[in-house]
Amino acid sequence: GLFAHLAATLHHTSTVVGQLEEILPPALPAPEIVGSRLLFIRGRASGTEAVCRTDGSVDELSGDCRFYASEEAAVRGVENGMVEPSDLLVVAGCGPRGGPGLLRLDRLAQALADAGLDVPVLTDGLPPENVSGLWASLVTPEAAASGIIGRLCDGDHLQLDLTEGLIRTTLKATELDRRKPFGVPHYPSFGYAARYARSASSALEGAGFG
């Protein structure tokens, strides 16, 4: 809002090579997916939250999880025919701490397109730009922060209610608590990546340093 308010002033700012508006390239229109919409979904009991992007053709979606702990593993699974059209693809380890840094799942989107699969994806990473289908992304808490997404297993049943904005499962809380949490990737105790992995805030909080 601030930049929009200052747009005219900024564009008329003088620089050593002329006014700013004269040297900047023309703005390109933002890409958009026709008919797409964004909404928040959450799991009441677990505190899980995610941003869901959908084309609006469905109000409810359910399926059995096909879990992968990284984008690389998910790509291999798709290429090897391990993902069925009825699956709900869960990809963990792509959030701010697990990445480290929010990873955009471009390779997975390409693998799904090459395989002719249009399956819903639940991930703690970022969805690719202009991708079709249903993507529930930026899941918080992420897997590397002991989020529920890191305790899901192949065959777990999930229901995404886009009307009420809820994530439902037939699993009991005691069952999830008994499961071993997702293994946090080990990074050296020094360096930018290690510092970020230790202190990054959640995806829905901006994924910056805490």
Image: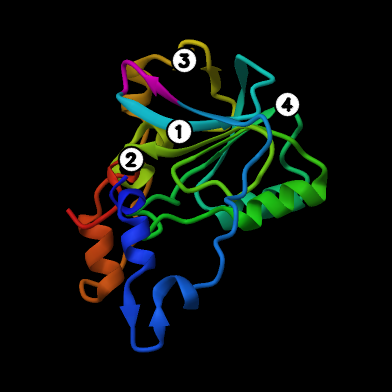
Q: Using the image, determine if residue 177 lies above or below residue 183.
A: above
Query: Which picture quadrant has residue 189?
Result: bottom left
Considering only vertical position in the picture, is 11 above or below 151? Answer: below
Residue at left offset 40%, top offset 58%? 99
The image shows residue 67 at horizontal and vertical percentages of 56, 38
Magenta region includes residue 206: no
Residue kind at label 1, given as amino acid type = Val
Identify the mark at residue 86; answer none if there is no mark. Answer: 4
Residue occupied by mark 2: 204
Residue ID at (81%, 47%): 115
Residue at point 33%, 82% (across, down): 15
Circle 2: residue type: Leu
Marks 2, 3: nearer the viewer: 2
Q: CA distance from mark 1 to mark 4?
A: 22 Å
Segment colored magenta = 40-46
Which colour scheme appears in the figure?
A: rainbow
Q: Say whether residue 44 is magenta.
A: yes
Rounded to the nearest angstrom, the CA distance separating label 4 from label 2 is 29 Å
* Marks 1,2: beta carbons within 8 A: yes
The mark nearer the N terminus, 4 or 2, is 4
Q: How many marks?
A: 4
Q: Which SS class for mark 3?
A: strand
Q: Secondary structure at mark 4?
A: loop
- Name the amino acid, label 3: Arg
Q: Is residue 9 above or below residue 92?
A: below
Inspect the image, locate mark 4, and give the three-letter code of the amino acid beneath it. Ser
Q: Mark 3 sits on what residue? A: 168
- Return the disc, 1 or 2, that comes first in the chain's sequence: 1
**Is residue 147 visible to us here?**
yes
